[in-house]
Image (cartoon, grey):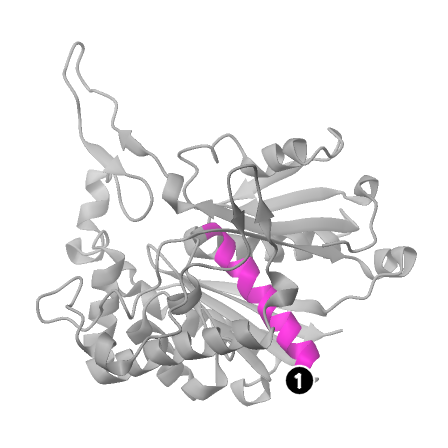
């Protein structure tokens, strides 16, 4: 979407991408510059903080501008999970046959043997298993998890119908197809359907395909500019970045990452959760989100008012940017002051970003 800045005014492009095993290898940010027909003189780099890659791209852009090293930065994220390749390990012996083959779309592959000893041997459990452990630790029930998943579907469907998401969804055209809306949302979802789904990761577990974010393809980008650049180009910003923070947690409880990251960020800026007008938290898994909200003292009806990743999908590298854009647009719509964006991150991290309405 046009923002009024000449491509010649772009100082840097930063994109988040978690996979980088297929067409997105070799610095997808730099490739995006060239494929978009922008000047070869514009530099770009790719960041990888797994699920929070797109959010970290925004945080890095903010720091670069705040440090006086840039005036205009395009920050975003991209992920094509449907095109993530199958990958094979390099043989360790000459003339040996095929080795282990792994799907690079999600999760661990070719694990460093030493990592298997971290977190009492639990550091490399699947993401779904980490959600089950969080649910058990914090007493999140199957019913509560399913109810939150249904809420996400209902709110996303309503947002799409009411046009709330029109300002952040671009139609994609090619010679073969035209895509004008996301495929993931289920407007006809019911509690009966969700409660009937089998557990996906444990025989006695509570996480199902309905309460987990679906694999998805997606890309998102925003423009960050200094105050001087805003005045120079006559821009009308949605929000300004106040700050960001990341924190580490036990890898096997990675879903709790938003808790310390948010606590660190709010303490740094002198705010409380009660002062937040908009809260966007990535819905990796319903019980993981609920556990974070409980620990932060946030009622679930305050978050993700236009639905979340359980309905819209979670293209890893892009999700953080999508959440930030949604949060900024919600601030404008309701006339709020502060918005929090927060995400859990695989291998035990959390990242949070604070926005203020411009």
Which is the main secondary structure of the residues drawn in magenta? helix
Residue positioned 51% across, 38% down in the render: 176
Q: Is residue 297 visible?
A: no
Q: Nearer the viewer, residue 153 or 21?
A: 153
Question: Residue 344 is drawn in which quadrant?
Answer: bottom left
Horizontal and vertical percent position of residue 217: 45, 50
Residue positioned 16% across, 62% down in the render: 201
Examine the rendered structure and indicate whether residue 223 appears above or below residue 82.
below
Q: Which residue is mark 1?
A: 334
Q: Nearer the viewer, residue 214 or 190?
A: 190
Question: Residue 31 is drawn in which quadrant?
Answer: top right
Horizontal and vertical percent position of residue 330: 62, 76
Horizontal and vertical percent position of residue 216: 40, 53
Question: Range of the magenta residues?
Answer: 317-334
Examine the rendered structure and indicate whether residue 234 appears above or below residue 189.
above
Question: Residue 1 is drawn in which quadrant?
Answer: bottom right
Q: Is residue 6 left or right of residue 254?
A: right
Mark 1 element type: helix
Residue 277 in the magenta stretch? The answer is no
Quarter of the picture containing the C terminus is bottom right
Q: Is residue 92 visible?
A: yes
Q: Residues within 10 Å of mark 1 (few under 14, many from 20)?
A: few
Residue positioned 29% across, 49% down in the render: 107
């Amino acid at each position: 979407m046009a923002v009024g800045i000449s491509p010649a005014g772009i100082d840097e492009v930063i994109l988040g991408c978690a996979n980088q095993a297929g067409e997105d290898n070799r610095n997808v940010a730099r490739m995006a510059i060239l494929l978009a027909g922008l000047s070869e003189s514009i530099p770009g780099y790719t960041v990888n903080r797994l699920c929070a890659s797109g959010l970290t791209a925004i945080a890095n852009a903010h720091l670069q501008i705040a440090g006086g090293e840039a005036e205009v930065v395009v920050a975003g994220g991209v992920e094509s999970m449907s095109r993530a390749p199958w990958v094979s390990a390099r043989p360790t012996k000459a003339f040996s046959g095929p080795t282990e083959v792994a799907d690079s779309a999600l999760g661990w592959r070719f694990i460093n043997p030493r990592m298997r000893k971290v977190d009492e041997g639990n550091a490399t459990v699947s993401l779904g298993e980490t959600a089950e452990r969080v649910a058990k630790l914090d007493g999140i029930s199957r019913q509560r998890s399913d109810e939150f998943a249904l809420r996400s579907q209902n709110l996303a469907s309503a947002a799409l119908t009411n046009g709330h998401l029109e300002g952040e969804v671009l139609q994609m055209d090619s010679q073969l197809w035209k895509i004008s809306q996301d495929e993931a949302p289920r407007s006809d979802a019911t509690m009966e359907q969700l409660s009937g789904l089998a557990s996906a990761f444990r025989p006695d577990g509570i996480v199902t395909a309905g309460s987990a974010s679906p694999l998805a393809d997606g890309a998102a980008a925003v423009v960050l500019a200094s105050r001087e650049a805003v005045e120079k180009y006559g821009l009308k910003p949605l929000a300004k970045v106040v700050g960001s923070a990341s924190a580490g947690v036990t890898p096997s409880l990675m879903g709790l990452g938003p808790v310390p990251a948010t606590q660190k960020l709010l303490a740094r800026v002198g705010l409380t959760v009660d002062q937040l007008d908009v809260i966007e938290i990535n819905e990796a898994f319903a019980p993981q989100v609920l556990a974070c909200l409980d620990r932060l003292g946030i009622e679930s009806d305050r978050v993700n008012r236009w639905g979340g990743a359980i309905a819209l999908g979670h293209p890893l590298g892009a999700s953080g940017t999508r959440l930030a854009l949604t949060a900024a647009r919600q601030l404008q719509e309701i006339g709020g002051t502060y918005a929090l964006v927060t995400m859990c991150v695989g291998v035990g991290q959390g990242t949070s970003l604070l926005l203020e309405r411009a």
